[in-house]
Amino acid sequence: MSYEQISLEHKNLLKDRLKSVSVPISEFSFPNLYLFRNSHNYEVFEFENEFFVRGVSYDGYTYVMPTKDISTCCIDTLRKLQTQCDFFFPIHESWIEHFKQYNIEYSFSDGDTDYIYTSDKMQNYPGRKLHKKRNLLKQFNENYNAVAFEMNKDNLKDAKAILEEWLEMSGMTKEETDYYACCEALNKYNDLCVCGGIYYVDEKPIGFVLGEELTENTYVLHFAKGLTSYKGIYQYLYNNFANILPKRYEFINFEQDLGKMALRMAKTSYIPDRLEKKYRMILK
């Protein structure tokens, strides 16, 4: 088999294939694979007239990822492929149900699990458990008159300025964050076909969100960066973006927490409507 490091040249090959999978798992997105190609050593290869992606998990295991519904793949093909990896990943729960007729082992990691919220929840922050989010949103709106614009080539430089200031305020290094992936997403905004919004207060850029359609009813939010000196900025970003999203997107995927406690606490605080597990599967 011939392995090729994933590049922009693979966009036409993979973009529609991944979208046709139609499961709300964030890895089934070409921008996601491309932007985090160095973190996972993503490689594209062809085997028995099908295309797959090989990667390395955060805990050091090699896996093979399908670029279509894996339950439609020939079981003998998958058994042969397993010699090239430690497991198949990410495997949707419905696919696990299909493969239970075979002798399989499967597991999942909390750090890999995607956080999914209804758009309605982000539009309103309803209920007692989200009253702090409502209060922060109210404070932001009372203190600031924010203006939203669609991200485009004319304001990308402002988004980059936000990213730099966000990094400085975080107190972390570039390597400890998703800085490099986010910076590349902005630099290759048009090539990757992502979209988003950027926000200003008194003409100062203070935050942006960046994502894309994942399935017909799910939008995935790849990046959200805000200046925390503006109290309530993230509650405002999520709320405003959810309200301007087309109505067909019933759900918003905020991706995984990578096992980082600060991310886990932040994402859990919005009370996810679904935790989308990504299984590791071995054919025994």
Image (cartoon, rainbow, N blue to C red):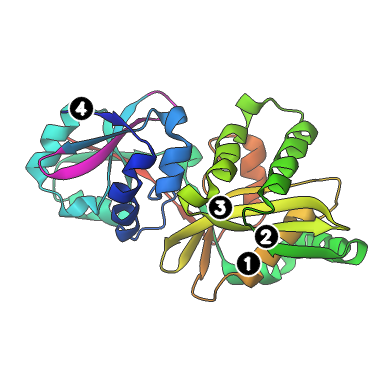
Would you place residue 45 above or below residue 71 in this image? above
Residue on which the image places disc 4: 84
**Residue 34 at what x, y percent from top left?**
43, 39
> Which label belongs to residue 187?
none
Q: Is residue 97 in sight in this rendering?
A: yes
Q: Amino acid at mark 4?
A: Gln
Instruction: Please report contact status of discs 4 and 2: CB closer than 8 Å, yes or no.
Output: no
Instruction: Please report contact status of discs 1 and 2: CB closer than 8 Å, yes or no.
Output: yes
The outermost residue toward the bottom is 247
Residue on which the image places disc 3: 254
Judging from the image, what secondary structure is the residue with disc 4 in? helix
Whole-angstrom CA distance, mark 4 to mark 3, is 31 Å
Q: Does label 4 or label 1 sit earlier along the sequence?
A: 4
Q: Amino acid at mark 1?
A: Ala
Whole-angstrom CA distance, mark 1 to mark 2, is 6 Å
Q: Does label 4 or label 2 sit earlier along the sequence?
A: 4
> Which label belongs to residue 238?
2
Residue on which the image places disc 1: 242
Whole-angstrom CA distance, mark 4 to mark 2, is 41 Å
Residue 78 falls left or right of residue 179: left
